[in-house]
């Protein structure tokens, strides 16, 4: 099943999505309905793009939806062919996931995706 990865300060997708990918308290994996599939706690081992080291290739999200992301994490996402999109206004993680699957989001500026 397709999923997206969204940073958050909460393990609850109905709470606001996180403001910066590299410092999130949680990394949420959500499906097309905004339902939580998995949640990984933020830690030095997974911050700033290192989360990809914890994921097996078959668990890779098809996209990450963020407000901000540093160049290092963007390069790692590009290496794994994971799109990086901007979530726009302050919305919940579930809303961001649904917006992605409804093609309502745009690539994060400077992410290399168009």
Image (cartoon, helix red, strand yellow):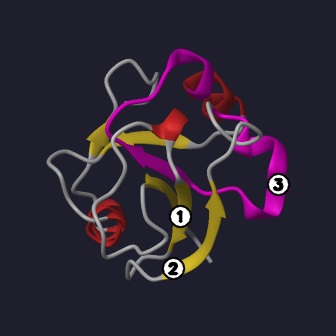
Q: Classify residue 15 as left or right of residue 25.
A: left
Q: Residue at x 71, y 42 (%)?
A: 46
Q: Residue 62 magenta-drawn?
A: yes
- Can you say whether 32 is above or below 67 in the image? below
Report which residue position mark 3 lands on: 57
Give the Cα distance between marks 1 and 3.
Answer: 17 Å
Q: Position of residue 60 (x, y in %)?
A: 70, 56
Give the Cα distance between marks 2 and 3.
Answer: 19 Å
Q: Which mark is residue 28?
A: 1
Q: Position of residue 51 (x, y in %)?
A: 71, 44
Q: Residue at x 53, y 16 (%)?
A: 71
Q: Residue at x 56, y 57 (%)?
A: 27
The answer to whether the residues at label 1 and label 3 have Cβ atoms under 8 Å apart is: no
The answer to whether the residues at label 1 and label 2 have Cβ atoms under 8 Å apart is: yes
First of labels 1, 3 by sequence position: 1
Looking at the rendering, the stretch of residues picked out in magenta corresponds to: 49-73
How many residues crowd around disc 1 within 10 Å: few (fewer than 14), some, or many (20 or more)? many
Q: Residue 61 magenta-drawn?
A: yes
Secondary structure under tag 1 reads: strand
Secondary structure under tag 3 reads: helix
Q: Which mark is residue 36?
A: 2
Q: Position of residue 1 (x, y in %)?
A: 62, 78
């Amino acid at each position: 099943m397709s999923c997206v990865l969204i940073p958050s300060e909460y393990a609850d997708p109905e709470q606001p999505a996180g403001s910066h990918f590299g410092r999130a308290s949680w990394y949420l994996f959500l499906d097309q309905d905004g339902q939580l599939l998995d949640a990984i706690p933020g830690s030095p081992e997974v911050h700033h793009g290192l989360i990809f080291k914890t994921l097996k290739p078959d668990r890779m999200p098809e996209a990450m939806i963020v407000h901000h992301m540093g160049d290092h994490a963007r390069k790692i996402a590009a290496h794994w062919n994971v799109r990086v999109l901007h979530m726009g206004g302050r919305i919940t993680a579930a809303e961001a996931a649904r917006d992605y699957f409804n093609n309502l989001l745009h690539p994060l500026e400077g992410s290399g995706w168009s």
